[in-house]
Image (cartoon, rainbow, N blue to C red):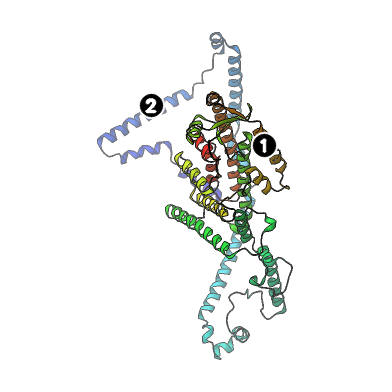
Amino acid sequence: MMRRGIRSSLRALPRRDRWHMLQEYAVGEMNQEEFRKLRVRDGQVTTLVESTSSTPAKTIDWASWDSRISNKEVLGCLKSFHEQQSVLLEQVLKEDHSASIKKQTEGWELFDAAVTSCQKSVEKSEQILKNGARALWISFQNPPISMLSQSEWLDADQYWQAFVEKHHFYHNHLACAVEDPESKDYDAKQKADLKRNWEAFDGRGTTRQNNKLLYQRPSFEYYDVFRGPLIEHMIFYLTKTGGDARTFPEMMPTKWYAEIYDVRFKLYNVLQRRKRQVHEATWSRESFHDFHPHDMEHDGDAYYSKLIAKESVATELCAGRLMGNFILFSDTYVPVQSGTAFYRAIQTDGGKGTFYSLGADVNCLFYKPAGEELSTPDPVECFQALADHATMTGRKFEAGYAAAFESFTEVLASRKEGLGGSWFTAPGESSREAFMRRLKKSDPAYDIYAAYAEEHEERWKAAKALSMDEAMAQMPEIERKYKIECDEYSSILFGLKLRAMLILRTHTPPGVNDEMAAAGKLEQAGSGSDGKESLGTTTP
């Protein structure tokens, strides 16, 4: 059958002279004249080809080219390549391709066997179709269960009679072909499924069906079952109090739960509005919230673990950059690394303050305004300044990320009620002491921060006061190094962002929002070339 199809398809291919008949479709004298000219040119080409086919092809006069070309190596390569190709073409032309094709007949037995198998499958399918049609006709002719009665039809059909006597109604959730609800095997299967489902839900090896309900459990068992609320409540507790996870209470104040709900629905309001805009704009079959995996049940843990790890690395890099120039913990001074920052620093008090240098290896000057010491800035004000700076420099936050960031700073600012107006430090405590007090000694980076805090204190004890002229003389070199530092830091952040995107896309199908874009924009806002100075002066 395949051979016949191949032969028929070859016969269907048009010959070269068949296209001449298309002249009948040429409309107008101009088109007909062009077609006649085309046929004349085709005849000339055909005549030329036929006249030259009998004459042998001209050979290359290598001696003539040898006298013309001075580069003998190139000529030798061309000559050897031409000879190799000529030999290959002659061998190909000498072969009898039609004979080699006719020899390839080994696969037809497999094809004939496949055709026979398909014919048997078709016969089996026709038999199944007939049986199914017969069963459907019988089922359609049977009356509904509610209309059954002790009639001649029911007495004659023993199967339906036994069905009505046993079940009285049709079980659509049973595989009636293999399951019998009245058998002991079916009862054992139901008990095994119940135990398996309970084990998967509770996970404590219990098989009692009358175990405690969720509202009867203590909080630690509730958090053991529901890990999501545990993470949510723990993050709020640590942000609200600045305490330790080891002192997490069994029951938080009711007001805090209300605040958690307010923050949650504030975020959902922003995310849902964003999702609706994307969904209505793209008319896609399904849409997902920003910063959420598509399959929360299976990929949620891995997704958020990698997201938190990425944010943690970015935070450590930011802290490391501040530590490189001893800006971290120098919250009572204004760091100056550019001309614009220098100008804005002296604007705070009209240039009445003093500049300090921590050494030639520190690429930063510190300005202490005259009068009272600088107070710790408010978290919400810092976020607003950072968001305004990002917007003015063309790096706007994602809506969901901005809402979460703002809610986080608002919870931080709420600490002031219990800390006498402070949200980070206790009264009379420096930022260095507060940071080291909150840092766990089991933290892998504890020794690094401890060594930095000690060196930071020593550097400030040996700090050198500079006059205005001396500070201005050092600014060009400091600003040059600062720009190099910003470029290197941006390259590092770009590499981290690219790696995080590749990891996340192993859990996220293509075509969705880039959840890491907002975090990357936040990092770039602190390391870009435009407006860097404002970040250095407003949020020391």
Q: Is residue 134 above or below residue 525?
A: below
Instruction: Say which of 247 and 108 sits in front.
Output: 247
Q: Which residue is mark 2?
A: 44
Give residue 478's quadrant in the image: top right
How packed is label 2: few (under 14 Cα within 10 Å), some, or many (20 or more)?
few
- Position in image of residue 209 (x %, y %): 69, 75
Q: Is residue 130 above or below residue 301?
A: below
Look at the numbered disc 1 and give the secondary structure of its residue. Answer: helix
Q: Which residue is mark 1?
A: 457
How packed is label 1: few (under 14 Cα within 10 Å), some, or many (20 or more)?
some
Residue 299: tell me if it is visible. no
**Between marks 2 and 1 in the image, the one whose residue lies nearer the viewer:** 1
| Residue type, label 1 | Glu
- Position in image of residue 154 (x %, y %): 57, 88
Q: Residue at x 53, y 43 (%)?
A: 522
The residue at the far front in this view is: 371
Q: Is residue 529 left or right of residue 359?
A: left
**Label 2 or label 1, whichever comes before in sequence order:** 2
- Position in image of residue 476 (x %, y %): 53, 25
- What's the distance in space between the residues labelled 2 and 1, CA to CA? 97 Å
- Position in image of residue 65 (x %, y %): 54, 12
Q: Residue at x 58, y 88 (%)?
A: 156
Give residue 445's quadrant in the image: top right
Instruction: Say which of 114 and 78 sits in front.
Output: 78
Look at the numbered disc 2 and give the secondary structure of its residue. Answer: helix
| Residue type, label 2 | Gln
Give residue 153's quadrant in the image: bottom right
Confirm or deny contact between disc 2 and disc 1 (CB under 8 A). no
Instruction: Say which of 228 and 259 sits in front.
Output: 259
Instruction: Say which of 154 and 171 sits in front.
Output: 171
Count the marks: 2
The quarter of the picture where the C terminus appears is: top right
